[in-house]
Image: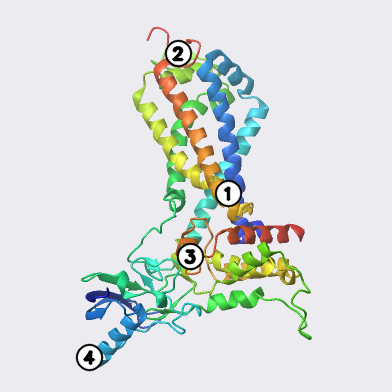
Amino acid sequence: MWLLNSSIGKKLIMSVSGLFLVLFLLFHLSMNVAAAFSGEAYNMICSLLGANWYAVAATLVLAAGVVIHFLYAVILTLQNRKARGNDRYAINARPKGVEWASQNMLVLGIIIILFMVLHFSQFWYKMMFAELMGNHMVTLCDGTTTVSPQDGAAFINYYFQGNILNTVLYLVWYAALWFHLTHGFWSAIQTIGWNNTIWMNRWICISKIVATVICAVFAIITIVFYLNGVGGGLVACPGL
Amino acid sequence: MDKDINITLKVWRQKGPKEKGQFETYQLQNINQGTSFLEMLDILNEQLINEGKEPVVFDHDCREGICGMCSLYVNGHPHGPATGATTCQLYMRRFHDGETITIEPWRSAGFPVIRDLMVDRYAYDKIIQAGGFVSVNTGGVPDANATAIPKADADLAMDAAACIGCGACAAACKNGSAMLFVSAKVSQLALLPQGKIEAARRAKAMVAKMDELGFGNCTNTRACEMECPKNISVSNIARLNREFISAKLKD
């Protein structure tokens, strides 16, 4: 099967899975925008998704996307190191016109995945996973207060409102994501073959715009959560 | 005005493909900056021979930038610090008095070192043999205007055909990928009507050979394009991806 055996086929898998993950980022972003304006609207989305079969199915597809993207990144990197040979250059100069991100995609990807572990432990594990385990209330805040796993607004307020450490960690995450996307997006298009001398600079520009819009909006919303919590003045931990 | 300069050379010495190599340091006095880089190495070798030592082995042939034989990795750049030029087109005026110049061979699993700075680039010939040609019955000479070709396509094909197969792309690539070379050789034919007939077979055969020979996977860092002595564009790589994917989808 050429998709699995040839170098271009394997790159195509990276490309398509990467573009799929970009689409997911846009989807996730739109939900966060809702939360910035209204906690109630966000909770509506949370209950719409919850642990319903379609949300679980989509999560599985998404997880497969991440796993495939990561797995092929590792496979390709190992092959590429082997292709480089055993003797390394004594002097390595990054040529003018080569983006730093393009030569450090695996490292950036690993940083992004490590933050995903943090993010999942804070949200997904206590929301969809808790519900799948049959828990209809989860403890939050001081350990005695319980909230519904579908009360996403409460989670956001608890983790971000006034929590500078978490906010900064998430901002670092977006920075790594920005670098990853500035190269990743146009590189994916190039791998599919939708490129030529005229579109090269256009795609690189579009790539920067896509990365900046995604990361900047995520960052602004995170800062809004830090300062004010979700829109509409819902309180995460009454009495704390 | 060109001056005479004194330089220190750090040269990779390796007895054979399986031997372990190391850097040797040499001093050269009063090298005129008008000297070409390869002439400077000739002077070094003369000095070494007079001292009764083994001269440094390096590849070179036409010394006018078209044969693709010279292949030195100078101070972290394939073909040295000049852009759009081969090693033989590099002159000592690019270097200053007292400078240490590090010279390494191409380092890529696809290009094993033969000796010192000379590497075996037969892999590129094998890729060409796999499909970098057109099969035609050559009869009488056809009229030059018998097959009309759009100017834009002719220009792109000519730009791709400027590739001299020196191997700088694979040497510059952190992934040891030969995609720029293969894409140029696929593009120069795929763009022309004479090459379109075998385009699908050619793309598949050349990529298969490239993979088989152990070259790496392209990650679009563009280091190849930036270091290419013939300024081959990575848009050729997009064309190769297109040719290859559509050829495979048609199967």
Residue under numbered circle 3: B176
Could you tell me which secondary element the residue under label 4 belongs to?
loop
Could you tell me which secondary element the residue under label 2 belongs to?
loop
Task: Name the spot of residue B20 as percent of width and height, x first.
Answer: 34, 77
Nearer mark to the viewer, of 2 and 3: 3
Q: Judge by depth and name the residue closer to the eye, B53 or A147.
A: B53
Could you tell me which secondary element the residue under label 1 belongs to?
helix
Q: Judge by depth and name the residue closer to the eye, B96 or A59.
A: B96
Q: CA distance from mark 2 to mark 1?
A: 41 Å
Q: Which mark is residue A236?
A: 2
Q: Are marks 3 and 4 on the same chain?
A: yes
Q: In the displayed structure, would residue A5 be above or below residue B3? A: above
Q: Quadrant of residue B188?
A: bottom right
Is residue B43 at all visible to an observer of this figure? yes
Residue type at tag 3: Gly
Image quarter of the C terminus of chain A: top left
- For label 2, the crowd category at 10 Å Cα-Cα, with few meaning under 14, some 14 to 19 and many 20 or more, is many
Residue type at tag 4: Glu
Chain at tag 4: B
Task: Name the spot of residue B1 as percent of width and height, x first.
Answer: 27, 73
Q: CA distance from mark 2 to mark 3?
A: 53 Å
Q: CA distance from mark 3 to mark 4?
A: 37 Å
Task: Name the spot of residue A90 as percent of width and height, x first.
Answer: 32, 66
- The residue shown at (41%, 57%) is A96
Q: Which mark is residue A188?
A: 1
Residue type at tag 2: Ala
- For label 1, the crowd category at 10 Å Cα-Cα, with few meaning under 14, some 14 to 19 and many 20 or more, is many
Question: How many numbered tags mark residues here?
Answer: 4
